Amino acid sequence: MSIQYYIFFCLALFSIGVVGVLTRRNAIIVFMCIELMLNAVNLLLVAFSKMYYGMAVQNGGATTAGIDAQIFVFFIMVVAAAEVSIGLAIIVMMYRNTHSIDVNFLNRLKN
Amino acid sequence: MNAIIVSTLLGVIMMFCSWGIKNVQAQKNIALVGLLILIFANLAHANAWYVFEYDTKGMLRFNSFGLYANTLLFSLTFIYVWLNGEEISKLSKTPADFYSLFFFILCGISILTSFDNLLMLFIGIEILSIPLYILTGADKKNMFSNEAALKYFLMGSFSTGILLLGITLIYGATGSFHLTDPVIDKLTGMAHEQMLLSAGLILLFAAMNFKVSAAPFHFWTPDVYDGAPTVFTSFMATIAKAAGIIAFINVFGSQYKALAFSWTLLLTFVIIATLLVGNIIAVFQRSVKRMLAYSSIAQAGFMLFALYGKSEIAKEGVLLYAVVYSLATIGIFAVLIKMKENSFDAFNGLSKTNPLLAFVTTIFLFSLAGIPLTGGFFAKYYMLSALLKAGAGLWLVILAVVFAAISIYYYFKIIQAMYFTTGESALGVVPKYYTNKLLIIAILLLVLGVFPNLLLNYLYF
């Protein structure tokens, strides 16, 4: 399968995430959409990694080609987990004060 | 490498201090000693004395610019903690938690000043941002602090997603995360890869603009800076922002710039929009804290001039600008912390109630506005001459000077309130030693305004 399919699929997934962040009002769902964006990127990185690996094997080159992208994926997972822990803590903190996780609440600072 | 490891260790040590040592004053002193150790570790690295020697496989590349930027930002953090220690202690029973977060932020900063790989850029930005989300929400019972934290967190993670997509597309085009990989040169003729690379670079550019709060990606800044506890706003607007700008210069100072997409046009648009939005909206603010948030957007616009060309004067200028702007902003926020409210009226008649405090505030504002004899003048001068040296048009320089003139209006509104408006200032209790510390910062600004080379000569050792 050519790489174009992967690129279009991942960009579609990423766009669903972006649209979700921009339109949804529930903080948890906004958060899930951000995770969706990150995972679309993970998928694309793995696809590119395999592409470069395949190219290197065909040309008889080094078989470690593309491995750095897969390492990058692990880093993204770790950082996303760290962000989840902070993000959920912030959402819980907000829920304790307002008894709501609606992001429409975020308009007091404007005035 | 020394700075990265030592700052992490110190962060962990501070974390244990938060339950091992109950005395708040002692926690602050440990943090100050830790910062001194960190500065010395970094200086040791700059003098080729490696405590920890690793082969980073091209992930990190240390140069004198990055190491000196580290030293300056660590020293600014030292001044910040030395000045604001009492205020930080008021926010929590265990302020050591906040100090440990500062050390983790400094670890992120030392990665951002020396990365040579997009993976390290990502890691550095995240290590810098995640503690900042916590610091924004540090005032747990305060609705504004909550709101600012959630907003900053959602916006920050969203921009991280954009940054990652940009990095991935760049990888797809070049097959490498390295900033200085020769493979990029060969690509300029190939249509598909070129398209992928341009899309990736534009996404990366947008995400970096977001992190340094340049327009049109500035919309989160005023709300977050306004809602966060004032002490931490002071940190975010100065040291964290300066680190973001140095990272920005590291990425786009490399050969990505030589690519065929219209880089200069994009950069000019962003800088003019940043100066315009920052300066014009700041004029209409009624709260000093919000005005300073917009002014920090405008000042970031000035620092971005260093992106036009990586000349010596641009490097010197961005370091001088970061230091001078940070000192003045830390000072003015330290005065604002002692006010009972954030409006301009709070400063009414301050010259009568506390003339020394009014005087140092005036120097901070002069420096932010770029009046000669204060550091701000030379900082702006260096940035503009770097701009001319990089071959940008004279009209851009004139436009920048016009915007600097507009900024005088809103900075001088405070001076006018202090000296020419009668009334009762909303000043809380200010101890004598606090004013003296501010006076020392003001003297530093005046010295840098006359001898900027005192700071810059060290770049070449």
Image (cartoon, helix red, strand yellow):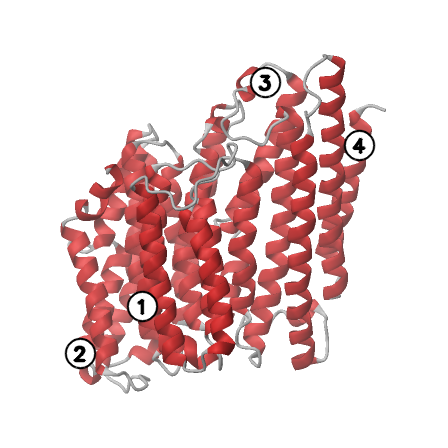
Residue B153 lies, in percent from the top left, at: 61, 61
For the residues bearing labels 3 and 1, Cβ distance under 8 angstroms: no
Sequence-first tag of 3 and 1: 3
Q: For the N terminus of chain B, which image quadrant?
A: top left
Q: Residues within 10 Å of mark 1 (few under 14, many from 20)?
A: many
User: Disc 1 sits on a residue from what chain?
Assistant: B
Q: Any mark on residue B332, and which?
A: 1
In front of the other: B218 or A17: A17
Query: In the visual, does B444 lie left or right of B387?
Result: left
Residue A57 lies, in percent from the top left, at: 75, 17
Q: Residues within 10 Å of mark 3 (few under 14, many from 20)?
A: some
Q: Amino acid at mark 1?
A: Ile
Q: Any mark on residue A6, and which?
A: 4
Q: Is residue B337 above or below residue B396?
A: below
State the residue position of label 3.
Answer: B187
Element at badge 2? helix
Q: Give the residue drawn at x 52%, y 44%.
A: B208
For the residues bearing labels 2 and 4, Cβ distance under 8 angstroms: no
State the residue position of label 2.
Answer: B355
